[in-house]
Image: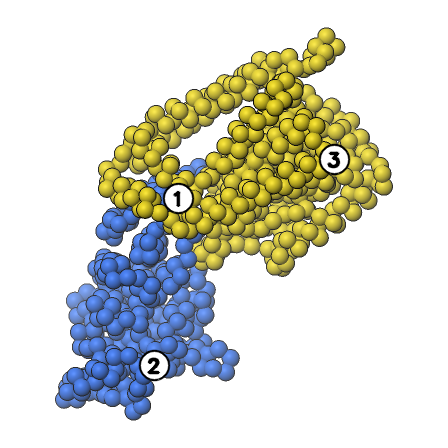
């Protein structure tokens, strides 16, 4: 992480050396081409939202990055170096952690045990519960998590937001550089969504790179710095969040394209915007200007 | 429901770590009420059974001869149940553990009696037999993916046949090694029994005190000295009472042969339970066993080799069953085609479940097997003393098992409702 930061030097933040860079990656399952020449750039200290309709290829892209379904072709650059990621272990070794929608926590274990699952700390051959518990508390405190009563609580007794927090903390605890969050707020209420989004923001502010997959445009606009839009397996746009509004993102998701117009980037109407997409119709008038 | 809600609110308001005894008690009550009952039903059941049988048969049930007999009777079932805990923890079942004990015991007889090799070679071959059976079952379940119920049902039949093949129709293999026979028939000298009592209590007290002090020094929440003291004193009282009871003369005719002292099998079972508890609670393997039982997919994603953990659990279960095979052979001085058969396995499964091991996986401890095994043994022993027929004993034991599984299922529902699943 530090090396990349120093290399970045005086370059402006948006074009600094990216942590992760995908160039023209492809993926097909049998005869079905799922990703077509997709480019993606992810920076340290920034939240990159990955949006797209169902079937656009978000999950496939993430699984490629995480090494679960390696890409068929294209370049995968991490910290400026070309790397080959063919299994999840290699991705983990680079510092890539994915928090899946189902969180993958063991209900019958407590928070500390879940945080350290698969990489338990040992002292003289036995589990070192004390150092694990201390570091777990520190990590949660570092993420300003104050909602859990005790780190020795069983995960089963936690609320949805708290579970999400534990899953994210686990990714952070593993010295990750890139944390990928798959729909972290999909199953949460308003207050808990707020909580988790604040946590996502804090991850980026602490210097990590974050990829956030979300269907919720409010969440995306609330925390994302960059927005990458997939449409039918192609990356239609990667823009800064401040340059677009709610309806423009929706247009991009539904097949709109970026056009440059008098030096300004605008979103053009798709030729065939599907009429049934939420929000698209109601916001259209505002976006056309 | 409203009571539980109020309790939870109370807990939330108590922000500062409250180390008082009352708080410890309150947290325990709230845990039990939330469905995290642990071995509590089994302990209560054991106490009730002891009171009932003691009042119905004051002379025969409570005398120290019967008490020692009860412990010896239950030992093999308890040991098999401790092995089953590993398999139950990962949500699987081993129906063949009883005959694994039988076949392993037969191998002990073949090596040490028929071939006249030293006893330790026989014990080694016996344990290796158990491990091999576990390996085969484990490969079929964990690597090939056949449901454990079917694999071990097949093994139950197959091993029964193998046992018959080894021993021969209607035959027996006598066990002649004094060392092996001593486990179930001999007792420790009285002084050694007391020395063992002192060592066990002091080790427990020192170990738990050190842990408590260490946690305190690191600023972590630790149990209070009062709770620690209560635990140590209760353990000392319980074990002291047992040792005292077993140290008395219990021979019906002391002039001919004197029997007093702790039976050798008791330290054997205690060492086993301590080793297995350390394995489950303090090692990476143990942690991963719980993880696989709790959520196999989460365990896999955390980088745990799930099939390997499953395989090891089956190997452990069968190897521990082989230890039970030694106990079974030692108890009746021989191995027959029915060793480990009959109700042995079902009593063992019952023992594990009654003790609080969940059939759904992820929950259970080796010590639960001891508590549950004692419940099963007390039922069988007490009913026998009440001159009940085998028919009634089976029906009552079946009822107790059903009750235990019911408590397990209900406490899970309760736990799910209160978020402590």
* Chain painted blue: A
To the question of a shared chain for discs 1 and 2, the answer is: no
Relative vertical location of residue B117 with respect to residue A142 in this rendering, above or below: above
Q: Between B131 and A256, which is closer to the camera in this rendering?
A: A256
> Height in image: A158 above or below A79?
above
Q: CA distance from mark 2 to mark 3?
A: 69 Å
Which residue is outermost to the bottom? A271
Residue A85 lies in what quarter of the image? bottom left
Residue at 38% of width from left, 49% of height from top? B418
The chain letter under disc 2 is: A
Residue at 76% x, 28% y is: B333
Residue B188 appearing in the image: no
Q: Is residue B409 visible?
A: yes
Mark 2 nearby-residue class (10 Å; few <14, some 14–19, many ≥20): many
Residue B34: which numbered mark, if any? 1
- Same-chain check, marks 1 and 3: yes
Quadrant assignment, res B13: top left
Q: Residue at x 72, y 8 (%)?
A: B255
Residue at the image position 34 percent from the left and 25 percent from the top: B226
Residue A4 picture location, percent across and down = 26, 63
Question: In the figure, is residue B401 to the left or right of A32?
Answer: right
Tag of residue A141: none
The residue that mark 3 highlights is B108
* Chain letter for the residue marked with disc 1 in the picture: B
Q: Position of residue A155 (x, y in %)?
A: 38, 50
């Amino acid at each position: 992480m530090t090396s990349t930061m120093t290399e970045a030097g005086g370059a402006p933040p948006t074009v600094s050396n990216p942590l992760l860079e995908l160039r023209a990656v492809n993926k097909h399952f049998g005869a079905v081409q799922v990703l077509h020449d997709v480019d993606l750039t992810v920076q340290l200290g920034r939240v990159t939202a990955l949006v797209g309709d169902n079937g656009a290829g978000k999950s496939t892209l993430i699984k490629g990055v995480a090494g679960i379904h390696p890409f068929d072709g294209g370049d995968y650059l991490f910290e400026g170096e070309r790397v080959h990621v063919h299994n999840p272990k290699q991705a983990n070794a680079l510092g890539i952690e994915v928090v899946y929608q189902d969180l993958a926590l063991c209900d019958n274990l407590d928070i500390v045990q879940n945080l350290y699952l698969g990489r338990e700390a040992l002292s003289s051959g036995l589990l070192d519960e004390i150092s694990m518990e201390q570091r777990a508390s520190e990590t949660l405190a570092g993420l300003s998590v104050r909602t859990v009563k005790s780190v020795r609580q069983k995960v089963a007794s936690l609320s949805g937001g708290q579970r999400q927090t534990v899953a994210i903390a686990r990714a952070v605890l593993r010295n990750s550089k890139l944390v990928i969050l798959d729909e972290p707020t999909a199953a949460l209420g308003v207050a808990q969504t707020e909580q988790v989004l604040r946590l996502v923001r804090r991850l980026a502010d602490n210097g990590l790179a974050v990829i956030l997959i979300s269907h919720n445009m409010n969440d995306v606009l609330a925390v994302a710095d960059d927005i990458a839009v997939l449409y039918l397996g192609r990356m239609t746009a990667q823009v800064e969040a401040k340059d677009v509004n709610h309806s423009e993102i929706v247009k991009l998701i539904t097949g709109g394209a970026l056009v440059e117009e008098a030096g300004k980037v605008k979103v053009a109407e798709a030729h065939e915007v599907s009429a049934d997409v939420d929000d698209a119709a109601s916001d259209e008038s505002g976006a056309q200007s | 429901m409203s009571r539980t809600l109020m309790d939870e609110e109370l807990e939330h308001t108590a922000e500062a770590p409250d180390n008082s005894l009352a708080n410890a008690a309150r947290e325990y009550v709230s845990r039990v009420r939330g469905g995290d009952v642990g071995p509590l039903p089994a302990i209560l059941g054991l106490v009730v059974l002891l009171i009932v049988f003691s009042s119905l048969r004051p002379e025969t049930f409570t005398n120290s001869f019967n008490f020692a007999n009860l412990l010896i009777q239950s030992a093999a079932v308890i040991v098999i149940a401790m092995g089953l805990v590993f398999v139950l923890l990962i949500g699987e079942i081993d129906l063949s553990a009883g005959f694994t004990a039988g076949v392993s015991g037969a191998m002990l007889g073949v090596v040490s009696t028929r071939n006249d090799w030293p006893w330790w070679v026989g014990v080694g071959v016996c344990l290796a037999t158990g491990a091999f059976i576990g390996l085969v079952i484990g490969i079929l379940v964990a690597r090939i993916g056949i449901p454990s119920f079917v694999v071990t049902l097949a093994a139950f039949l197959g091993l029964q046949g193998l046992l018959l093949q080894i021993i021969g129709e209607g035959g027996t293999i006598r066990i002649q090694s004094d060392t092996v026979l001593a486990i179930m028939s001999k007792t420790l000298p009285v002084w050694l029994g007391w020395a063992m009592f002192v060592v066990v209590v002091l080790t427990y007290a020192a170990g738990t005190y050190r842990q408590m002090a260490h946690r305190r020094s690191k600023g972590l929440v630790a149990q209070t000295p009062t709770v620690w003291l209560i635990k140590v004193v209760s353990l000392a009282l319980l074990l002291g009472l047992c040792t005292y009871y077993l140290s008395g003369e219990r021979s019906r005719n002391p002039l001919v042969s004197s029997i007093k002292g702790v039976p050798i099998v008791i330290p054997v079972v205690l060492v086993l339970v301590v080793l297995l508890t350390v394995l489950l609670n303090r090692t990476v393997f143990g942690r991963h066993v719980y993880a696989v039982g709790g959520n196999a997919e989460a365990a896999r994603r955390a980088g745990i080799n799930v099939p390997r953990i499953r395989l090891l659990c089956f190997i452990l279960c069968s190897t521990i069953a082989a230890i039970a095979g030694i106990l079974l052979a030692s108890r009746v001085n021989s191995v027959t085609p029915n060793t480990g058969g009959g109700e042995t396995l079902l009593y063992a499964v019952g023992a594990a479940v009654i003790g609080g091991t969940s059939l759904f996986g992820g929950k259970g401890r080796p010590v639960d097997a001891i508590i549950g095994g004692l419940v099963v043994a007390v039922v069988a022993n007490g009913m026998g003393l009440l001159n009940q027929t085998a028919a009634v004993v089976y029906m009552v034991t079946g009822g107790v098992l059903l009750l235990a599984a019911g408590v397990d299922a209900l406490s899970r529902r309760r736990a799910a409702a209160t978020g402590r699943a």
